[in-house]
Amino acid sequence: MTEGVTGTEGATGGRAAQLKHTGLRPGWTTGACATAATTAAYTALLTGEFPDPVTITLPKGRTPSFALATEELTAGDPTAGDRAMAGVVKDAGDDPDVTHAALIRATVRLLPPGAGVVFRAGPGVGTVTRPGLPLDVGEPAINPVPRQLMRSHVAEVAARHGGTGDVEITVSVDNGAEIARSTWNPRLGILGGLSILGTTGIVVPYSCSAWIDSIRRGVDVARAAGRTHVAGCTGSTSERTVLAAYDLPEDALLDMGDFAGAVLKYIRRHPVDRLTLCGGFAKLSKLAAGHLDLHSARSQVDKTFLSQLALTAGADAPLAEQVAAANTGLEALRLCESRGVPLGDEVARRARDEALGVLRGAPVEVDVICIDRAGTVVGRSDPA
């Protein structure tokens, strides 16, 4: 259920190189598909014609083209108003993604000048009903990066064809409510359907053996190049954080993904002087709790464990109870931050200690950096 809840940080250069060696075919996120459908629909509203295929530009510069599976234009229809709908079938490549082959629709309606871009959840797209997610309660479950991607393409179409860029975008997914039952969305309080996700627009195939092999090869390359400090990162956002914190060359960055155990076990046998682990707070809280596979299908954030760490970090009993009852790890973190309790640092320290346990005395200094979704450092351990 790769894209059902929170998505991944996105494909990095190392992951792209991995795919060349494994033959695994990447795909496109629901956010990329929604952007393509939005671009086609808004173009049709302004020109009367749907571009097919429609080409978009992803955050890292790739320009994929998408064939339209369905289209409908009602511009000039006094009974329906000026609106256009376009749909794209999601291709997840070789990833076992529950949203593969889903029809992603975007209906675009013109709004008065100055209204901006407004997002709506259509059938099959969920609505946020609990705090702790990167969207406010009541908002459509269309994540921040896909929203920005759609806004930028709306602006480009408007500039090209003389529009104002003021539109309402309603994203829907055929059978999305049914598909969402196979995800963690209902448990997280995202009700009514799926989330529209993606940070790079690209779905990277989830292959355990291939990914772990690429981690091992990454360690080998770093050691061969004489690197004494390497960093295991869960995705592109954590890579940027590490690069800002340390002057590391690209070949010292390990595309760890969810496989913290693979990094630690291989470095135990092939040591380097220093290892930095960097990733999202929620993921690293799983490592802190003793999980070596951080994928959502195999480990979950333990809020009871987080409440115990909060007590260790100085929380009082009522705050610890709030942490235990939090909807998400992010909400637990924010609750502690608001009270000046350094839960992020405590998670980083405990994750470091777990990592040292896996290393079993190998001569490797370890430090851990926890970040939030924006890449802000929210917790850090001292090297040990």
Image (spheres, rainbow, N blue to C red):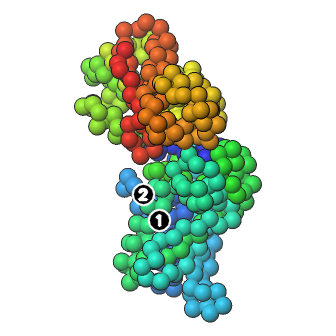
- The reply, left or right, for residue 226 in relation to residue 36 is left
First along the sequence among labels 1 and 2: 2
Depth check, front residue: 256 or 190? 190
Q: Is residue 91 above or below residue 341?
A: below
Disc 1 is placed on an element classified as: helix
Q: Amino acid at mark 1?
A: Met
**Residue found at x 62% / y 79%:** 72
Q: Amino acid at mark 2?
A: Leu
Quadrant of the image for the C terminus?
top left
- The reply, left or right, for residue 186 in relation to residue 352 is right
Q: Is residue 345 above or below residue 191?
A: above
Q: CA distance from mark 1 to mark 2?
A: 10 Å
| Residue bearing mark 1 | 150
Tell me, yes or no, if residue 190 can be seen here. Answer: yes
| Residue bearing mark 2 | 58
Depth check, front residue: 196 or 120? 120
- The reply, left or right, for residue 225 in relation to residue 196 is left
Q: Is residue 236 above or below residue 75?
A: above
Q: Position of residue 120 (x, y in %)?
A: 59, 67
- In the image, which is nearer the foreground, mark 1 or mark 2? 1
Q: Position of residue 63 (x, y in %)?
A: 41, 60
Query: Residue 352: which numbered mark, if any?
Result: none
**Residue found at x 49% / y 40%:** 334
Q: Position of residue 314 (x, y in %)?
A: 48, 25
What crowding class fits label 1: few (fewer than 14 Cα within 10 Å), some (14-19), or many (20 or more)?
A: many
Disc 2 is placed on an element classified as: loop
